[in-house]
Image (cartoon, rainbow, N blue to C red):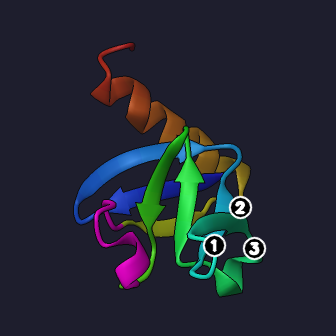
Amino acid sequence: MYKLMSGDKLIGVFQKVVFIRKVTETNTNIECPKGEADAIVAGGIVYAITNSTDYQDCEQVAIFELDSEVERTAELDYMRVMANLI
């Protein structure tokens, strides 16, 4: 699971994300390994993860991988509270 933050704002928690980079010759986005990515697609939206000029029109986010069950449960509980579902 991945948590995306923009400043102090929680964008969301996603089970699957796709790391991408721009191919300038063809002006297309391609899937790539995390270490080569300039952006990420989560929930159908492209977010910048570096200061790349290719993605300057996208909201920039920080990515946090949620590894433990405790982190996942706490994060989901937080999201439910924020959405007034509890």
Image disc number at residue 32:
3
Q: Is residue 76 left or right of residue 80?
A: right
- Amino acid type, mark 2: Asp
Taken as a whole, is the magenta stretch helix, strand or loop?
loop
1 or 2: mark nearer the eye: 1
Q: Which residue is mark 1?
A: 26
What secondary structure is found at the residue carrying circle 3? loop
Cα distance, mark 1 to mark 2? 36 Å
Q: Position of residue 78 (x, y in %)?
A: 40, 37
Q: How many residues crowd around disc 2 within 10 Å: few (fewer than 14), some, or many (20 or more)?
A: few
3 or 1: mark nearer the eye: 1
Image disc number at residue 67:
2
* Between 1 and 50, the one nearer to me in the picture: 50
Based on the displayed image, in which of its 4 quarters is residue 47 positioned? bottom left
- State the quadrant of the C terminus: top left
* Residue 65: in magenta span: no
* Between 15 and 37, the one nearer to me in the picture: 37
What secondary structure is found at the residue carrying circle 2? loop
Cα distance, mark 3 to mark 2? 21 Å
Q: Is residue 33 left or right of residue 17?
A: right
Write the residue at 55% across / 38% down: 43
- Amino acid type, mark 1: Thr
